[in-house]
Amino acid sequence: MPEIPGDVSRGTDAEESAEIADLADTESSRFYLRLKGVFTDSGSRPRLTRKRYKAKEDGGSQPFGPGRDPKGLGSALDALTAQLGWQSPLAQSSLMESWAEIAGAETAKHSTPAGIEDGRLTVQCESTAWATQLRLMRVAIMTSIAQRYPDAGITSVRFLGPDAPSWKKGPRSIPGRGPRDTYG
């Protein structure tokens, strides 16, 4: 005879295991048996509660135990960025924002970092003269980057002058060789 919730009569273990075998046929009875195993008070603690007490006995989480001291927010964020692999992208974005400190205030007025791709920093310059000047300063700039931002992974710097106009694109372009000497 299956056990009814709230029934105070108890049989022997053999009778109870026979009842369990009979009840395990349907989904609702399996669900009932699962809840019964979790919430019964049959002299011992339910299985899930036993796991919690065992973890406490093993020293899994004790107040004032070793390794439980609070950490500073900065060290926690540093550990998180290292764990998630964000150190290189964060160093790259810091490098882009501090371009004026790396290249100098006057140079930064005439050049802006355009992006970083595959370890190459691309800098867009205001004129070809500034691009040439920055190419001459490449070693000093690379040294400064390597010292301040070693995690950025910058291996080279590319300085670009202003873009020349292109006749290949636009609403009035036609396929062909482009502008040529058409006078005469």
Image (cartoon, rainbow, N blue to C red):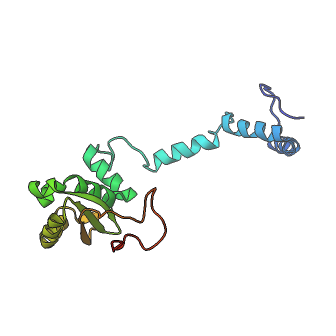
The relative height of residue 48 versus residue 160 in the rendered view (above or below) is above
The answer to which of 7 and 64 lies nearer the viewer is 64
Q: Residue at x 35, y 52 (%)?
A: 80
The relative height of residue 73 versus residue 139 in the rendered view (above or below) is above
- Quadrant in which the N terminus is drawn: top right
Q: Residue at x 35, y 57 (%)?
A: 86
Left or right: residue 44 versus residue 99 is right
- Residue 148, position as x, y percentages in the image: 17, 61
- Quadrant in which the C terminus is drawn: bottom left
- Residue 21, position as x, y percentages in the image: 85, 46
Left or right: residue 79 versus residue 53 is left
The answer to which of 28 and 83 lies nearer the viewer is 83
Asked whether residue 12 appears in the rendered view, the answer is no
Residue 28 location, quadrant: top right
Residue 179 location, quadrant: bottom left
- Residue 51, position as x, y percentages in the image: 56, 46
The relative height of residue 121 versus residue 28 in the rendered view (above or below) is below
